[in-house]
Every structure is written in structure tokens, then in C-alpha cells.
Image (tube, helix red, strand yellow):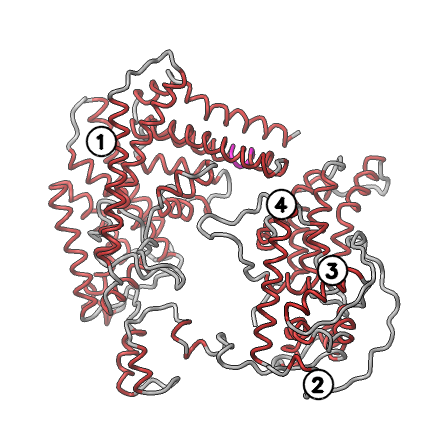
Amino acid sequence: MERLSCFTHTLQLVIKDGLKEASGLSEGHKALILSQRDYAQLKELIEVLDPFLEATDLTQGEKTVTASVVVPCVLSLHCHLQEIRGRVRYCGPLVRALASSLKTRFTEIFQAVKMPGCEPAEGRGPTKFPFTTAYFIASVLDPSFGFQWLKHDVQLDSDDKDQLMTQIIDCIKAEGEKQMISTADTAAGPEQGDVPVSPPAPEAPQKKLRMFSHYSKTPSSTNSRSVQAQLTAYLDLIDNQASDPCFKFWQKNKSQFPVLYQVATQPLTFAMSKLAEPWSARQQQQLSYISEFTTDIQHVAGKSNLVADCLSRVVIGAVQLGLDYTRMVADQPRPVVPTSWRSSVFEAVHDMSHPGGKPSGLGTQGYLFVSVGGCVLAVVTMGVYSLLLFTSTSVFILLVCSVDLRHVHTWVFAVQMLWQTFWHLLIQYREYYLHEPVSIRLFLAVSSLMLLTQRITSLSMDLQEKRVVLTFNASSKSNACVMLLPLISYILNFTTLLGGPLCSYRNFVSLMAAISLHAPPNPLGVVLLKLMQIILLECIKFYVVYLLKHSYYDSSSSIYGVLWVWGLALVFRIQYYSHWRISECLNNAAGFGFLEKEPEDSPDGCKLSDGDFCTIEASSRMSEFARRWNATTASWLRRLVYIRCKRFPLFMTFSFSLWWHGCHLGHFVGMWTWAATVKADYHIHRYLHPKLSSTQSKIYSCLGWINTQMIVACIVIAVELRDMSGLRLLSITYIGLFPLLNTMLLFILLKLNKV
């Protein structure tokens, strides 16, 4: 039985969010004399919040099926805010804040009904009714609502509404079929365990709710037995007949719709057998009212009850332990582990992860292999400059052993960034002041130092936040080197030394432990597939470079200049994509990247990845591109800077990024342009998207993709060329107008919001 959020509490949080934004409404009065403006303001405020009061009273009622009113209330409140938005004069900020908070806190409901502006996150696929399934089923099986909310409050065309209705009906049919499997004789009539009760006393007429006053019905009747027929008959009945309240309706029509009756009332019966703390007075009154209609508790067969039986079912397991479950079951029926298997099972589970502890046996050999391999790779590729990495590693280990772990991140961050910045400035001094060529080995060392900064600061944050616990006591000092071996191998891991996605320390230790237990699934096939992708990318890059070299640059043709610069930026981006794929191949060949997948994912080793080039290039918004580009680095920057900054987090994140990249002139222009255009994208999308139709939205997405490509081209040219040459190239072509126009629109929209 899944646990659902308290709807009334969440609704109050929506109101709280709205009142925070409407600061002018919370100002008090020293006198009791109100002006005409005050009266008008209060009148508007009452008009805005009155449906929220009605929804709160409705969901707090003792004789109301709260679950069935969630979806109608949320959608009705959304329509109310959209309708009143253009009429309010004083409460505009409040209405906007309420609408935004409503979409945020009930985002699964809005995504399920495909509400514009509430599309699911990339990579998640289409919405398939997550935890909100119960809410949708409850609203449809409440005869007071049915599909009235879909007809009146969902802003979709008829085809999309029909598709959504079919999806919900399929969910109800699936629940009904489960009930028929678990209790085959349910359809024949009432259960033998049902206790006959006298019908409840007539109730006083209920108050007509204004939120749902436009839901109209006319009489009709029918009768059916099968799940599909019962559902069709039920929907026809409630659409054409004024029905009783929910509980009375199902008590009266229990024999007519037996399967739907079980689906509608089954969640209520769990509370009847709850063995926990005493109920509150309100809960006792609610259960007393429910018991007048149903206390039916049905048995669910083990084959259908996957949640209760998950511990003995291999299909539910999300962790691969390298055990042959088939042989284990042959030796001993479940759920007892055979005596001969207990040692293997204990080692498989117990040795999965010991962050910071003493590794033993095969685990120590794996850590040694990874760390020694990283040291050898650093010396071979960087020569004497490999000391940059070894110095950082040594200082980090010294700080971890000597500094209080509550302050270790501050020390590590300061020392590491100062050390990295020194070498960045040294490179700039040699390039721009002495005009000396810089050794490629030094470039490799500094680039690797930047990646090492990611791993060190990520681990220091884990230590400070106690996500990773290290123990250094008197009894363990003799084994300190062995205990610190996982830290050293994580920092100097040869698979991520020269490039590749950032992996957290906890995942690294878990992966190392899992690799020691069993081999990854078919790394050769994954590596070959990614090598083919690398070859394809290199072929595309070769063709684009060929076109750029053999095309005469005509500065008088504005379109040609824009396309030429875009092609050059594409070449730079393909280099990144190829580098990422090579790093992923190295990780997969070493066994990393397979064990972080979820059960439904295919074993393609893509979880440890910086992003898919097709998905990144398909981004139609700058904010989408920023989230998808170099995904692990973006997550690291978000954790390190964005969520820690209380003022201007977006600007501070991109500012730190340019510091981390080296503080070249092109970095300043590129990173701040990126920050401004991402901010502009948020405001432009928020302003335009709600006003567009479905056809206009498609045109908007196409134009957004072109705009994103042009802005990204400007950013890549500025960052990659680093000096004035990139800025000159952007200044003589019209491509620089795209980020400029976006920035101008940002200031205009900010000015309009202030007004």
C-alpha cells in the first residue's frame, strides 16, 4: 500500500508560497480606517483565495473521500488562477506565485494531464501516472466527478483528452483484473464475509460547490458484469444521472458493479485493520462513517502480491550480487538460504561497500591496480608535471588526516583552487607576456588537475556532510596506508585521470567491490558500440572541417558568415563528444559504468556518462542545453556552488566555472554570456509558452532550437579560442546578435515584472 502526500497540507504550502511573493498584502495598518484601495485589494484577495478555502474545507470533511477530490481540486484551482489572472489589479504577483507553486507541488498531476509548461524532465520519457495513479482512479470512481474534470478543466484538444481518458481507463481495468484474479467469485455478488448493515440515516442536503458547479448530469441507467462492460456502464450512468454521494452510490450499486466496487473501496479497508497508535477523534469519526458502507478485507494471492513477497522474488532485486539464484533454489526452497550458500551470500552483501574502511583480499588488489595504473599513466603522459597531481593528492590526504572533518571541505577547496589557479596564471604569463610556447605536457597536467579538483572537492563535501565516514583511531594507525588506499585510488583512478565523467566516492567504492565479486555484463559489446559512435563522430568532424577549409569566407554574406562560425563551433563540440565517448569506453572496459543502472535499463553501461550527443544537440532551450552539457560536471557545479549561494546562484555558478577553467578573456565573455542567456531563457519561456497553441508551440520549439544553436556557437568560439581572436570572429559576423538580443529581452522582461 503506497503512502500518499497529505493533500490539505500541500495545498496550505501553496498558499504560503503565494503569500511570500505578495509582500505588499501582508503590510499591517496602524489604524482601523481602510482606504478605497485597501477595500479593493481585500476584495481581490478574497476572490483569489476563496476557492482555496473551499478546497480546504472540502478535503477536511469527515464524510468526504479526500483522494477523489485531489485531481478535480488541483485542476479547478489552476483554471481559476488562469481565468482571474487577467482581471486582477493588485494581486497579480500573488496569482502568479500561486499558479507557479501549484504547478511545482503538484507537478506529477499536471504532467499526467500534459499541461503546457509542465513537461517531464528529459530522459524520463512520457508520464505513466507515477504515485498519482490512485488520485486519478479515485476521481473517476467517485460518481460526483467521473471524467467531468477532464472535460472542463484540462486544456487539451479532443484527441489528447481521449488518449488521456483511455490511459486512465486502462489503469482502472488493470486494477479490476487484479481483483478478479485474487477473488474469482467476487463478480457473483457480495462477499460472504460482509456484514449486513442497515442503510445510513438520510443526510441533510449538501452545499453546492462553486468550483464544480459547471459539472452537469442528466438521468439514465444500465447494468453489466465484465470489467470493461462494468466500466462503460458506470461512466454512462454517472454522466447521465444525478448520483448519490460516493459511499452511498457504491453501497447501492455494489451488486451491479462488483469489480469496480472492490477497486473503489479496497484502499479504505486497510485502515480498518491498522495495528498502531490510537486514532485521533477525527479519524475515528471518518472510519465510523466508512464502516457503514464497507469493512471488506480481501486476501491477495502471493503471485499477485509482489510487494509483500519481494524478499523471496529475484525479479524484484535491484542489486546484482553475483549469485546463481537458480542453483540456490534447487538446493533449498525459499525463503531459507541453504547452509552451504550462507558464506557466499554474507560476503556478497557484507563486502558491497566499506567507504574509508580497511579493504581486504581482492579488494586491496583492485585499489592497488587502479592507483598504480593512474600513477604510471600520469608519469608517461605528463612527465615531470605529473608532480602537480601527486602534490595535490598528498596535500589532500594530509588535510583529511589532520583537519576536523566538519571544516575539511573549506580547507581542501581553498588549497586546491589556489594551487590550480597558480598554474593557470603561469600558463597565461608564458602565453601572453613572454610569448613562449607552452609544453603540451603542462597543458595535460593542468587539464588533469582540473578533473582532480572535481574528485577532491566532491569527496571533501561527502566527508563534511557525513555521506562518507572515515575512522582514524589508535588501533588503526598501523594500517593507515591500507585504509587510505581507496581514497588515493579514487583520486588517481587511471580511467578518469585524463578525462571522463565524475563518479562519487561512494559509487566508486561500490563499483570496486562489485567488480571484485563478478565480471560486468559483456563489456566488449558495449565498448565496440561506443567505438563505432566515435568513428561516426570523427567522420562528421572530418567532413565539416573539409567544408570549412575549402569554402571561401565571404565577409559580405551575413548568412554565410553565421553558418561558417556555427560549423567551426560544431567541430569543437564534436571533439568534446568524441573525448567523452573515449573516456566512457575506458571506464566500461575497466568494468565501471554497468552497476549504476536501474533494473529496467538495458545493460549498456551508459549511466557513468557526461551526456548523449544527440540529446544535447536536440536541445531547444539554453537551460536544457546547460543541464545536458557535460552532465556530471554540471551536477558537481550545482552541488558545489549553486545550492550553497543564497544570492545570484546562477551568476555565481558560471563565475566559478570561468575561474575553474582558467580565467582567460574568452572565458569571461563565454561564461557570462551563457549565464545571461540561460536566465533570459527562463523568463522568455515563462512569458511566452503559456500563451501559445499547440501549433505555435511547435514553431516556438523550432525557433528555440535555432536560437540555442547560435548562442552555443558564440559561447564555444569564445571559450575555445580564449583570446581576442574569438571575439574578433564573433564581432565581424551577425551571429553575435543572438546572445545580444536574448540579453536585451531579459532586461525588458525584468523591467516589466518590476512594473
Q: Nearer the viewer, mark 2 or mark 4?
A: 2
Percent position (x, y) of residue 677? 47, 31
Percent position (x, y) of residue 190? 70, 83
The earlier-in-sequence mark between 2 and 4 is: 4
Q: Which residues are magenta?
A: 680-684
The kind of residue tagged 3 is Phe
The kind of residue tagged 4 is Ser
The residue identified by callout 2 is: 194
The kind of residue tagged 1 is Leu
Q: Along the horizontal axis of the image, is 30 left or right of 677?
A: right
Mark 2 and mark 4: Cα distance apart in space: 47 Å
Look at 30% across and 30% down and name the residue there: 720
The residue identified by callout 4 is: 100
The earlier-in-sequence mark between 1 and 3 is: 3
Q: Along the horizontal axis of the image, is 710 left or right of 694?
A: left
Q: Nearer the viewer, residue 589 or 554?
A: 554
User: Counting other residues with Cα less than 10 Å from the Cα at mark 3, is it few (<14), some (14-19), or many (20 or more)?
Assistant: many
Mark 4 and mark 1: Cα distance apart in space: 48 Å
User: Counting other residues with Cα less than 10 Å from the Cα at mark 2, is it few (<14), some (14-19), or many (20 or more)?
Assistant: few
SS at circle 2: loop
SS at circle 1: helix
The kind of residue tagged 2 is Asp
Q: Along the horizontal axis of the image, is 80 left or right of 542?
A: right
Q: Nearer the viewer, residue 258 or 396?
A: 258
The residue identified by callout 3 is: 145
The circle on residue 426 is 1
The earlier-in-sequence mark between 4 and 1 is: 4
Percent position (x, y) of residue 262? 66, 75
